[in-house]
Amino acid sequence: MEIRDLGSALTDEHGGLEILSDSDLDTGVNTAVPEAVITWGETLQENTSSILYIASKEGQFGVLAVNEYDGVTRDNLFSGDASAMRAGMRETAEALAGMDAVKGLQIYTGAGTGFADCDEIAVFIPADISPGEAQSVLAEIDANVYPQQALEMEHGQEQNIGMNMELS
């Protein structure tokens, strides 16, 4: 499946992607979202470093798993080079698209689409796949979305680079 532009998918009336919650999966007054989808999303959210949103893609409910690439990411993983960061995001998105667990799912990249104009990689996970399959997708995303970070951590050079990590 082709990698699509997140900004266009969210703003173009034919883009087919709509975010229906905040990052806490609170849908507010949007009662069109089935409770089972919200519960499913909350269960998935417990085991991922991705930011999850309840979303609808072409009328199908699911979650949008988002990972942000911000200035700290750019500075720490890409030596401050925004072009290199965007190229790295694209390479990561293409690698994700080829992984068995993620194959066939819609992947998006967005320049300036996130909070405080962060760039993003996002994957739409439809609610009609099994919880185990959804967990496998999220595990692949989590393991691969910041490959350089994972390599540094594996070699004991862990540093706080400010990406979707919660401090305990």
Image (cartoon, rainbow, N blue to C red):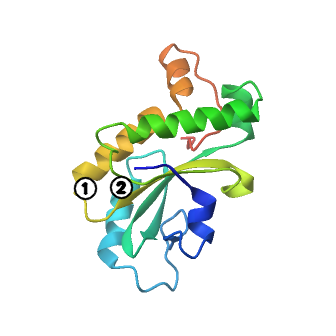
* Viewport quadrant of the C terminus: top right
Residue nearer the viewer, 149 or 3:
3
- Image: 14 above or below 52: below
Identify the residue position indicated by label 1 in the image: 131
**Residue at (30, 48) in percent of width and height:** 135
Q: Position of residue 152 (x, y in %)?
A: 55, 19
Residue lying furthest right: 80
Provide the secondary structure element on which disc 1 rests. Answer: helix
Residue nearer the viewer, 69 or 48:
69
Count residues near mark 2 (Cα–Cα under 10 Å), then give few for <14, some for 14-19, many for 20+: some
Q: Position of residue 35 (x, y in %)?
A: 33, 77
- Image: 107 above or below 20: above
Tag 2 near tag 1, CB within 8 Å: yes
Q: Mark 2 to mark 1: distance in Å?
A: 8 Å
Q: Position of residue 62 (x, y in %)?
A: 38, 65
- The tally of labels here is 2
Residue lying furthest top: 155
Residue nearer the viewer, 60 or 66:
60
Q: Amino acid at mark 2?
A: Leu
Residue nearer the viewer, 48 or 101:
101
Q: Which mark is residue 88?
A: none
**Residue at (33, 68) in percent of width and height:** 39
Using the rendered view, name the quadrant where residue 77 is placed: top right
Provide the secondary structure element on which disc 2 rests. Answer: helix
Q: Amino acid at mark 1?
A: Pro
Q: Is residue 117 left or right of residue 103?
A: right
- Image: 147 above or below 164: above
Count residues near mark 1 (Cα–Cα under 10 Å), then give few for <14, some for 14-19, many for 20+: some
Identify the residue position indicated by label 2 in the image: 44
Using the rendered view, name the quadrant where residue 57 is placed: bottom left
